[in-house]
Amino acid sequence: MHGVMTRDFPNFLMISTVQGGFGTNFVHYLTETSKHCAHIIRMCLDEGITQIEPSADAEEDWFNVLMSKVMGLGVYNASCTPGYLNREQAAGDMKGARGASFMGSVEEYADQLIAWRDASELTGVVVTKAN
């Protein structure tokens, strides 16, 4: 799933840094995520799928991946001068955490997307097919 889908919004593919990738070469991130969205759309067209959305478990699994990558940012924010980007060093909350980006490299993020695509199935996605 990797941050491009959200439950209760079927067929909505979103390219965003919220639960998506992030990096200094933002165009690279956009390219990799666009390829991923195009792959999902192609699979749906080829397999007669009319509706997709992630399962609740898949959303939680992706959130856990995000949290496994965010520690370096947490340490930095705690030691950085208070400001806008670290919420003036205020304690975080779950709402803020759910808006985290994938804090690994863009290459690592792309590898996650590629591995999901290479499985050749919509793992973690609830599908509805045409009758």
Image (cartoon, rainbow, N blue to C red):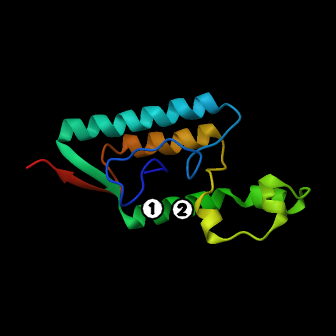
Q: What residue would you read off at disc 2?
A: 63
- Whether 83 is drawn above or below 35: the answer is below
x and y percentages locating residue 61 in the rendered image? 48, 63
Q: Measuring from the top left, give residue 28's x and y in whole percent.
A: 59, 29
Disc 1: which residue: 59
**Outermost residue, left direction?**
131
Give the Cα distance between marks 1 and 2. Answer: 6 Å
What residue is shown at x 33% (from left), y 55% (from top)?
Answer: 53
Question: Which residue is depicted at the point 68% across and 38% down?
Answer: 23
Residue located 60% across and 28% down the image: 27
Q: Which mark is residue 19?
A: none
The picture places residue 59, in percent across and down from the top left corner, at 45, 61
Circle 2: residue type: Phe
Other residues around mark 2 within 10 Å, as few (<14) / some (14–19) / many (≥20): many
Vertical order, 28 against 56 (above or below): above
- State the residue in front, 38 or 15: 15
Viewer-nearest residue: 9 or 20: 9
Q: Is residue 18 toward the left or the right of residue 13 in the image?
A: right
Mark 1 residue type: Glu
- Tell me whether circle 1 and circle 2 mark residues in contact (CB < 8 Å): yes
In screen coordinates, is 102 left or right of 8?
A: right
Mark 1 secondary-structure assignment = helix
Considering the numbered disc 2 on the image, is that residue within a helix, a strand or a loop? helix
Q: Is 44 placed above or below 3 here?
A: above
x and y, in percent, of residue 72 in the image: 76, 56
Please name the residue shown 82% across and 58% down the image: 77
Quick check: 49 left or right of 101?
left
Number of numbered labels in the structure image: 2
Closer to us: 124 or 79: 79
Choose top left, top right, bottom left or bottom right for residue 76: bottom right
